[in-house]
């Protein structure tokens, strides 16, 4: 059986492609263009959720970033990139592994939704969301002040989960990282990883990577 990763362009399924490259495992990559913004019918037909990522392994079809990443790591990677409970940084790892999709991603999505509705910056909902946005980035920047990776000295799936929101997501919600020096340095380290370079060359060969301080320009 061959593990198949279905990647929707400019989406969080890039996480799964990157994971496979970091683990150096065999997989088949199928990419799908948006039509024009949402997933095309052939992608939506893969899973009832109709969202990226989606993987297939024999008769199994699986969605959700965390589920796909955990499945691949334990079935094909021997648990690599997850820290065991005996590890001194286990609690930190657990927190940042779940933080990305439990706190960070919802905050960014809420901000994107409110902006699209042209909600006033002074409104109650925008004030709450903006405050959460700043707190999330302050926490992340603080964590990376004295740590090379989110779990500490070891690169883990917590990093794989977090980076999409800091990079490609900025094509959907442009924001600057000017105030977050440690996050910018972190993205430089990410961009130097061979696994990340290989993954993005495969799944987004035409995309200018959003690893810098400023978000991509609109025409990109």
Image (spheres, rainbow, N blue to C red):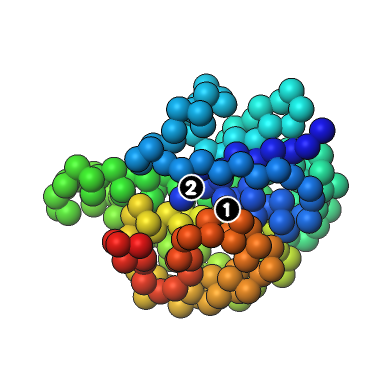
Q: 53 left or right of 81?
A: left
Q: Which residue is mark 1?
A: 203
**Residue 179 in sight here:** no
Mark 1, other Cα within 10 Å: few <14 / some 14–19 / many ≥20: many
Q: Which residue is mark 2?
A: 9
Q: Is residue 147 above or below residue 56?
A: below
The secondary element bearing badge 2 is classed as: loop
Q: Judge by depth and name the residue closer to the eye, 8 or 15.
A: 8
Instruction: Tell me the residue at 44%/35% (across/down).
Output: 39
Residue 8 screen position, x and y as percent: 51, 42
Residue 99 screen position, x and y as percent: 54, 50
Q: Is residue 85 above or below residue 201?
A: above
**Residue 217 in sight here:** yes
The secondary element bearing badge 1 is classed as: helix
Q: Disc 1 or 2, which lies upstream in sequence?
A: 2
Instruction: Tell me the residue at 35%/52% (across/down).
Output: 172
Q: 155 left or right of 9?
A: right
């Amino acid at each position: 059986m061959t593990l198949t990763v279905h990647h929707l362009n400019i989406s969080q399924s890039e996480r799964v492609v990157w994971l496979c490259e970091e683990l150096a495992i065999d997989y088949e990559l199928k990419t799908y263009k948006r039509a024009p913004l949402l997933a095309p019918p052939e992608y939506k037909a893969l899973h009832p959720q109709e969202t990226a990522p989606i993987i297939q392994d024999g008769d199994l079809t699986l969605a959700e970033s965390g589920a796909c990443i955990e499945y691949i790591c334990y079935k094909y990677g021997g648990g690599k990139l997850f820290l065991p409970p005996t590890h001194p940084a286990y609690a930190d790892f657990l927190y940042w592994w779940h933080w990305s999709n439990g706190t960070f991603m919802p905050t960014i999505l809420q901000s994107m939704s409110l902006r699209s509705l042209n909600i006033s910056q002074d409104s109650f909902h925008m004030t709450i969301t903006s405050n959460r946005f700043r707190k999330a980035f302050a926490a992340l920047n603080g964590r990376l002040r004295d740590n090379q990776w989110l779990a500490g000295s070891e690169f883990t799936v917590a990093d794989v989960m977090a980076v999409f929101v800091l990079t490609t997501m900025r094509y959907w919600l442009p924001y600057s990282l000017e105030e977050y020096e440690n996050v910018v340095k972190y993205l430089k380290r990410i961009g130097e990883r061979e696994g990340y370079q290989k993954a993005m060359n495969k799944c987004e060969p035409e995309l200018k990577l959003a690893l810098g301080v400023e978000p991509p320009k609109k025409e990109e």
